Image (tube, coloured by chain):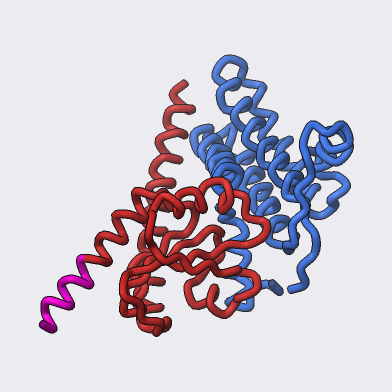
Amino acid sequence: MALTTVDHSALKVNQTGIVATVLVAFIGSYFYRPLLILIPLLAVVLLLGTFAPQLALFKQFYFKVLKPRGIVKPRPVQDRPEPHNFAQGLGGVFLAISSVFLLPLTVVGLALALLVAVLAFVNLAFGYCLGCQIYFQLGKRGLIRA
Amino acid sequence: MNAQLWAIAVVGIVVLAAAGLEAYRSARARRRVTGVTSAKAAEPYIIYFTGEGCTVCRTHQEPALAKLGEVRVEKVDAIADRELADRFHVYTLPTTVVMSAEGRALHVNYGYAPANKLDRQLAEARNVLTMERTATA
């Protein structure tokens, strides 16, 4: 339960990256179907980033490029990183499931991917993190060590 | 484009269902907390859960609360006062709770609540107060 410092700007950049990638895949696939490959790639990025933060592409882009150049200002906040990581992992899992459906059932695959983007946008714009809420609820029921 | 349109429709339905569930959760939380806060006041008031890292609180919720005028707002740090936050099932910041003058939670808003929404809820709370006073008179 210990609070540590979490840079919320990194989270925002991550969410922006998710929304942008899914939108490019979603809209772009209408004109050029191979762009759907972005969805499984994003799933891999999110899942890798969940278990190995140094492989989190968007966060690393923030830490290595945006932050040092002053493009995005850091916003360190006393917070727990676990709920955010869990939310990211959940997004990755949903995108992985979406990837499985993309070829046989494109509508289901696209809908799942779009849902992840909508939730990332809601978190980005309104600070409502559904994944974090699920994390707290699971913790409360003793299903995970929250 | 058909697949994209269907996907948008599916997500729309899911979002609407989620909004419905959220409304249900809010109503359930409101029922559960009835009576837990015994602080009585002359007028309905708002409990405002916030936290140090909540940007939306500063950029949206606080200006919205300022627009309400002469309304008592009890600011609560949800991280420091976890017990009170848990009573209202606060997992989202900001959260605003519109309390009746008798200290009953009438509306629980998870996430940003605009001024007009809070105004409407306060008006409802005042109507409840007037009706109760009329009934006891």
Picture layout, residue B56 above or below residue A36: below
Image x and y of residue B75, in percent: 53, 67
**Residue B128 in magenta stretch:** yes
Which residue sits at x=70%, y=35%?
A17
Which residue sits at x=49%, y=64%?
B48
Instruction: Tell me: B91 left or right of A48.
Output: left
Q: Is residue B41 visible?
A: yes
Which residue sits at x=20%, y=66%?
B127
Q: Colour of chain B?
A: red
Near-viewer residue (A10 or A22) = A10
Examine the image and state in which quarter residue A140 appears.
bottom right
Identify the image quadrant of the C terminus of chain A: bottom right
What is the chief secondary structure element of the magenta stretch?
A: helix
Image x and y of residue B40, in percent: 36, 81
Image x and y of residue A74, in percent: 79, 44
Identify the image quadrant of the N terminus of chain A: bottom right
Picture layout, residue A70 above or below residue A10: above
Q: Which residues are magenta?
A: B127-137
